[in-house]
Amino acid sequence: MNLNNSNKPIIKSSLEKRSDLSWIISIDSLEMDYPWDQAMWNTSKNNPNMYLYSYSDESGFCLFEDGDVFHIYKIVISSKFRRLGLAAGLIESLKIDAVGKDIYLEVSDHNQAALKFYQSMGFKELFHQKKFYSDGAGCFKLSLNTLEIDF
């Protein structure tokens, strides 16, 4: 268990071992521009390398895959808990776990606030991909090299 700058405990768990994903799926559906359908969640749940960082009060979570790189699929914070440093806390926990690996993610090119946030956390733009999302929106592919981080 890690603590972030808001002193909320962050719990790491294997996605495949989680019996209840209802609040995670609910917050994803309510807060994300591109929520996953049940089939996507089922596929991810069957991947032994998928993990969640989550807050015990269900205020937010980070879904990522631990492989050659840490691939962040989702960081979702409930709107009533935004601007409290919770997303930064999740990223800081990832940085600690990912030492020696890159952290990689995609962010919609329509979501400038998220792009600026990730850049403030040290992520660098790799490239822009057109028509990445189902509605035709593009994305920026970002990466953070954990070997370059001063802890």
Image (cartoon, rainbow, N blue to C red):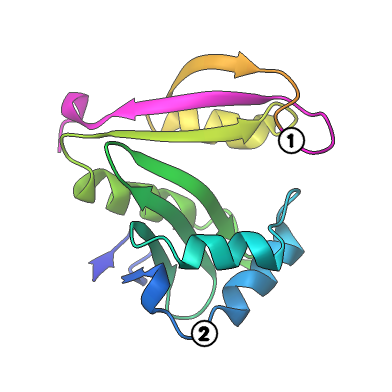
* Picture quadrant of residue 89: bottom left
In the image, taking residue 65 as reference, residue 114 lies left or right, namely right
**Number of numbered discs on residues:** 2
Residue located at (55% from left, 33% from top): 106
Closer-to-camera residue (76/86): 76
Q: Earlier in the sequence, mark 2 or mark 1?
A: 2
Badge 1 amino acid: Tyr
Residue located at (52% from left, 85% from top): 20
Q: Which residue is mark 2?
A: 20
Q: Which residues are magenta?
A: 133-151
* Picture quadrant of residue 32: bottom right
Report whether residue 57 is seen: yes
Does residue 75 sit above or below 54 in this rendering?
Answer: above
In the image, taking residue 32 as reference, residue 147 lies left or right, namely left
In the image, taking residue 101 as reference, residue 131 lies left or right, namely right
Would you say residue 53 sits in the magenta stretch?
no
Q: Secondary structure at mark 1?
A: loop
Q: Position of residue 47 (x, y in %)?
A: 41, 60
Q: CA distance from mark 2 to mark 1?
A: 27 Å
Q: Which residue is mark 1?
A: 133
Q: Residue furthest bottom?
A: 19
Residue located at (75% from left, 30% from top): 110
Would you say residue 137 sits in the magenta stretch?
yes
* Picture quadrant of residue 130: top right
Q: Which numbered disc covers residue 122?
A: none
Q: Secondary structure at mark 2?
A: loop
